[in-house]
Image: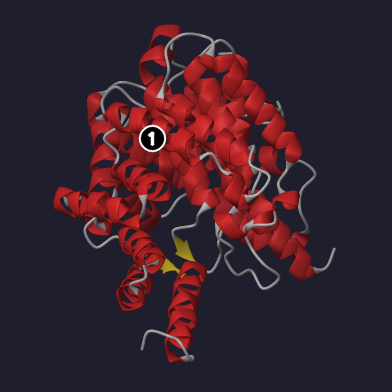
Amino acid sequence: MSEKLLDYASEHLLRELAPQVLGAIVRRFHDFTDAEDAVQEALFAAAVQWPKKGMPDNPRAWLIQVACRRMTDHLRSELARRRRETSAAIELDYLASVAEMDSHVEQDDTLILLFMCCHPALSRPSAIALTLRAVGGLTTAEIANAFLVPEATMAQRISRAKQSIKSSGTPFRLPTSQEQTQRLGAVLHVLYLIFNEGYVASVGPRVQRLELSGEAIRLTRALHNLLPDNGEVGGLLALMLLTNARRKARTGANEEMIPLAKQDRTLWDQGEISEGVALITATLSKGSISAYQLQAAIAAVHAEAARAEDTDWPQILALYELLKHMSDNPMVMLNHAIATAMVRGPSEGLKLLTVLDQDGRLKGHHRIDAVRAHLLEISGDCWGAITHYRLAAERTMSLPERNYLLTQVGRLSENMKSPGGRG
């Protein structure tokens, strides 16, 4: 393998293995903050050594061993500082020997880490933010975008979350069945946000980050295997599969964005659609309905339409009406406005956007400008559409999305100049 290819392979493998290694180290040493530092050092060592010396036969075991040694060194230093060298030496040697032997056991601790990060010492938003950082590998900016808060606010929240865990005195460990039930909502929310960031990258040069959406699906599938009768888990997995089925049709030859209405639906993954439809059908028959199940049902309606013009928008609107009463998420209300426009006309959708403006949570967010631009274009107000497409382009941190929005500005501007245009 060439050095360039090895660098590429190493980068993606390290991203995939990082949460697994962190889970293993936290489980052994019960200290999240120090474990995170040790794993970062191990990842740095791998990034430096693997391109020069070649990738080890068992990369995960290699990383765990290096991180365990870093943790052992750190503990030895701390214990020495506290003048407990003699009594601690036996314990440290034991810890090191266990870590060396256990690192060869092929156990994926990522799902365990998900539950562990949803720590009882933390508020739910803080637990979710910390888990997105530790398990999802999202940047602070990406997490802030998901929560619709400034990056500085999110940085403080994550820092406080780590400090809260450290000062609580409650160790990280495998949660009991009761604790799993209590933390399940936060775990599902984390998986949902990781998938969303992978499916629609909020920052950077790519439309989608398949490593994130793929990992979210893998972990949700593992959770579904653990809790096969839980309708909420099944609904989330169905939602991910039905949404992810469109991934090949979402970009063109030059990685440009292709909106849902213009996608080549023959490229949609029929295997994922079939599995997703079967899952959501099964979960809807089990009684209580969750927000994830309703979103999956909406995705299934889209998936069942052979052409965009065949989409059953009245059914989608009815589902969003239910979802809106169940969830106070402003993005749900934004999508409800789109569905309303598709059924009752763009003017009705624009009225709902005015109400959403007063909510304030999407103030300055590019998506509300993008949706307003689209509805204004449908209604015939090309100048208004151009204005809001430009605003959306200025506000998004995604380069492909900015290019797409500016393309709409250029298209409408050319139409306005052409004979018959509304110049």
Which class describes the residues within 10 Å of circle 1: few (<14), some (14-19), or many (20+)? many
Q: Secondary structure at mark 1?
A: helix
The quadrant of the rendering that contains the C terminus is bottom left
> In this view of the protein, which residue sits in the foreground, 268 or 186?
268
- The vertical placement of 255 against 314, above or below, is below
Look at the image and tell me whether residue 143 can be seen.
yes
Left or right, 101 with respect to 384, comes to: right
- The vertical placement of 45 against 387, above or below, is above
Look at the image and tell me whether residue 216 can be seen.
no
Q: Residue at x 52, y 31 (%)?
A: 296
| Residue 93 found in image quarter | top right
The quadrant of the rendering that contains the N terminus is bottom right
Q: Amino acid at mark 1?
A: Tyr
Where's residue 128, x and y in %? 36, 36
Q: Residue at x 34, y 25 (%)?
A: 119
Left or right, 22 with respect to 6, comes to: left
Task: From the image, tell me which residue sits under label 1.
Answer: 320
> In this view of the protein, which residue sits in the foreground, 87 or 232?
232
In the rendered view, how is the structure colored?
A: secondary structure
Where's residue 358, x and y in %? 14, 52
Left or right, 421 with respect to 355, comes to: right
